[in-house]
Image (cartoon, helix red, strand yellow):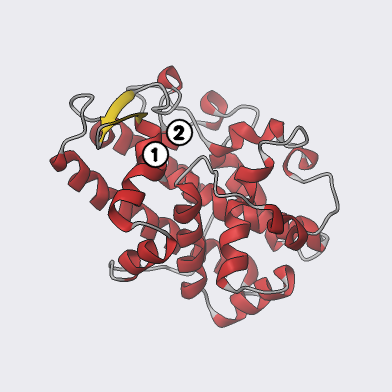
Amino acid sequence: MLEKHHVLMRSRTLLIILISCFSNTAFAWGHDGHGAIGVLALRQVQADTRLALQNILGTTDDQTIVEACNWPDVVRKTDEWAWSAPLHYINIPKGESRYSEQRHCPDQLCATEAIKRYAEILGDEQTIQIERQQAFAWLCHLTGDLHQPLHAGFASDRGGNEFKIVFENEDMNLHGFWDRALITSRAGDLAGLLGVLDDYPVVESNHSWSPEQVNEWTEESHKLVEEEIYPPGPVISKSYQDKSWVIMQQRMTTAASRLAEILNTMLGRE
């Protein structure tokens, strides 16, 4: 069982103070991708959910949401939070299609199990405010991570980090292509990405969420890794870029709608 102290920040400095220290260096979907998912999710939540979240965070303006949703990538680089690195992904071996907590995340230090735990913390009205603030940040970030397919990839190449490619005459790895490079190439910045995703069909939310659904999301991303994500060769072609861009938009908008489902379920009753 993942102990509560493993998923809570030990400092009691308010999250709203910490977000003033954000940088644009991130590890998954990049700063703009995580921010866009959070902003889109907040546009879909019910009014009472947004009010409850505003009471927790102090404000739900776009800047605060963007910074909060990127906060886990900032603190993972500190000694205090070094332990949290495994929360950002889940490794499933090639050829396996079903997620198993016992096989793939026995210590519960993975994205799949952390999403469930942080949702519980966010929805617990008896939990102190700072811990609920942090829980929202982690929940937003890790929901985004889990929908970046390579975060449910293979340990053998560290989720594509050791799969070398050439994109627009630049040497990089496949993970970096999916995290940042393609977004920058096709959308530019956060405003550009939001403009693109605003025009993309919204994935309908059922306004209901259960922890078991996260297992299905994990398997969904892993299936994409198995079938769609790896290019046929090291030089990224125009056709692969186009296919990847469609998948990327689908994954981001799906992540936003599912994050909205979690927030509605955990906070809508307040």
Q: Quadrant of the C terminus?
A: bottom right
**Whether residue 190 is situated above or below residue 217 in the rendered picture:** below
Residue furthest out toward the top? 156
Whether residue 197 is visible here, answered yes or no, is yes
**Distance (Cα) linking label 1 and label 2:** 6 Å
Q: Residue at x 73, y 75 (%)?
A: 55
* 269 left or right, relative to 146: right
Q: Which residue is mark 2?
A: 99
Q: Position of residue 158 (x, y in %)?
A: 45, 24
Residue contact between numbered discs 1 and 2, judged by CB atoms under 8 Å: yes
Say which quarter of the image contains residue 54: bottom right
Q: Residue at x 28, y 68 (%)?
A: 201
* 183 left or right, relative to 82: left
Residue furthest out toward the front? 169
Q: Which residue is mark 1?
A: 219
Q: Position of residue 242 (x, y in %)?
A: 18, 47
Residue furthest out toward the bottom? 47
Q: Residue at x 42, y 17 (%)?
A: 156
Q: Position of residue 130 (x, y in %)?
A: 79, 59
> How many tags in the picture?
2
Whether residue 121 is visible here, answered yes or no, is no
* 53 left or right, relative to 242: right
**Whether residue 181 is situated above or below residue 190 in the rendered picture:** above
Disc 2 crowd rating (10 Å Cα; few below 14, some 14-19, many 20+) is many
Q: Amino acid at mark 1?
A: Glu
First in sequence, mark 1 or 2: give its number. 2
Disc 1 crowd rating (10 Å Cα; few below 14, some 14-19, many 20+) is many
